[in-house]
Image (tube, grey):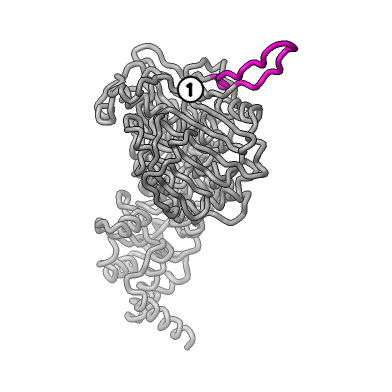
Amino acid sequence: MSTSENIAAKQETMGFQTEVKQLLHLMIHSLYSNKEIFLRELISNASDAEDKLRFEALSNDALYENDGELKIRLDFDKEANTVTIADNGIGMTRDDVIANLGTIAKSGTADFMSKLTGDSQQDSQLIGQFGVGFYSAFIVANKVDVFTRRAGADASAGVHWSSEGEGEFSVETVERAERGTSIVLHLKEDESEFADGWRLRSLVKKYSDHIAFPVVMQSEPVPAEEGEEPKAPEDETVNEATALWTMSKNEVSEDEYKSFYKHISHDFQDPLTWSHNRVEGKLEYTSLLYIPSKAPFDLYNREIPRGLKLYVQRVFIMDEAEQFLPLYLRFVKGIVDSKDLSLNVSRELLQADKTVENMKAALTKRVLDMLGKKAKNDADQYQAFWDEFGQVIKEGLGEDFSNKEKLAKLLRFASTNGNSEQNVSLEDYVARMQESQEKIYYVTAETYAAGMSSPHMEIFRKKGIEVLVLSDRIDGWMISYLTDFEGKHLQDITKGELDLGEMDAEEDKKQKEEASKTYESLLTQIKELLSDKVDDVRVTNRLTDSPACLVAGAHDMDAQMKKIMEAAGQQVPESKPSFEVNPEHPLVKLLNEEQNDERFNDLTHVLFDQAALAMGEQLKEPGTFVTRLNKLLLDLSK
């Protein structure tokens, strides 16, 4: 560093954001087994800075300041026990430094912190999902100095940031002739292994070989032959410095693909799978798409920036270009490099570009095909994916009608054929359907247990018919867009009159007809009594153990969706359920024989309220229900 960089013009000391303090403490104590990732993270940040300068210079080449050779420099000093990572990229202003190095500007931080357990091994995995970036420097350093200047600014606008990774950091204005950023790591005593040329070279080859900008180091000294002058060290590029996505798939190893994923995602877990593809013809572009193995903490925040890195003819244009994939695929990471877009393209222009629409359709299809292939060839890995990302895939049913069939095949559900794990595909269900079964049956409920204990399940349990149990909050909305699959209609078992077709024995149909005649007077009495609450009263063919149940209209909103809408403050359309009674149940027989009007009314209302409770609904008058029930219990004790 030049002495001019140590001339303070304005210095102030500030405190780290609370989350930064926690993250620093956790990284220092949790990531000791992954400490070498600090170099990958800092070189990735330097690469991003170079990309941003190249993009901004498209419209203002004065930003190059007569130095258009973009590179990342890596130096070390064994005596001082330091490592320096420098770039001549876009650089930072004083405000940038305070915003970027003093806070974690990433949504989901609070959720991230709440999930930390205090267990070093578990927390290291969580930190990996969150992304560590600049702060990884403190894994190996007890002090970090950052010297930076924004491209195009005066030399007097340099900034020096310094911290020992505890509660505070200092910022001062300094003279800095060079644009870009230099990060000086003052290594801990027991981390001196990193102040070594061979060690740093091996880490660059291992983690950053794919960086598209040259990573430059001085060559290692070569012993001079006798009588010759020692050869002065020279600058040499230690990485391939080739944009990985421009290479043929045959030229890229599995480890290189994984390293590149970690570079663009700042995740230090391996991706689940990826797809590298070059398209030629009407459209010309290259894509490299990755499916992460773990969901980010802000996955369910639909407002966060997301998307692919966009390049045009290998020139970086923007991060998080959301126009190339639908919102439900917001977890996908990767790059797209187009030959058909202009270098001065903006987010606004992308929105209305027909080329982008066509690319979006093709990239969406590629992601869904990638997932479909994983589901077919590796059920265990796909199940792991579904457990992480299944709920956002469900969003696609209402957002992407053109891919409805592909999405339907990716869905996984819990069912009566197993346990609460969502591991049953619609193809699995159809393959197991009974010979005369014509429909795919499902129930929506707040929990798997509630779905399994629904009285509507009774006839299906008796006949051995599998029922899908949908208990995610999104399921009621999602299933409204999925009315059929491979010619089989999906039927909610809590809606409409139940018609099991040929699975209904003739004897059962005959018994129902006879019961309807026998109990015709009772059904009329109940309907008159509950006229303000029910649309119809009829004999059931779906109950075997319960006395009664409520059934929504065939086109009514299910109870789960009603609750979600009510919780969101939205108006729910008024509808009355049908009330079905089981003529074989002793309570219904008792009701049919009851001569006392008051007791008949009480018992009818108690049966109705019980049926509502079994559906997971809240009673409008719980006190009245308790009073009626207590009266009936006292009558029984007399």
The answer to whether residue 330 is seen in the rendering is yes
* Front one among 633 and 26: 26
* Front one among 499 and 299: 299
Task: Please give the name of the residue rendered at 33% of the width and 64% of the height, measured from the top-left corner.
Answer: 520
Going by the picture, which residue comes out furthest to the bottom?
A: 638
Principal SS element in the magenta part? loop
349 displayed left or right of 173: left
Instruction: Judge whether 6 appears above or below 618 on screen.
Output: above
The answer to whether residue 397 is seen in the rendering is no
**Magenta stretch contains residue 5:** no
Q: Position of residue 131 (x, y in %)?
A: 50, 42
Q: Position of residue 519 (x, y in %)?
A: 37, 65
Q: Position of residue 202 (x, y in %)?
A: 64, 27
Amino acid type at mark 1? Ala
Q: Which residues are magenta?
A: 219-240
Task: Please give the name of the residue rendered at 26% of the width and 24% of the height, measured from the top-left corner.
Answer: 353
Q: Position of residue 118 (x, y in %)?
A: 59, 56
**Regarding mark 1 in the picture, which secondary structure is present there?**
loop
Task: Please give the name of the residue rendered at 38% of the width and 69% of the height, measured from the top-left corner.
Answer: 609
Report the residue marked by disc 1. 212
Q: Which quadrant of the figure has residue 51?
A: top left
228 displayed left or right of 139: right
Q: Which quadrant of the figure has residue 342?
A: top left
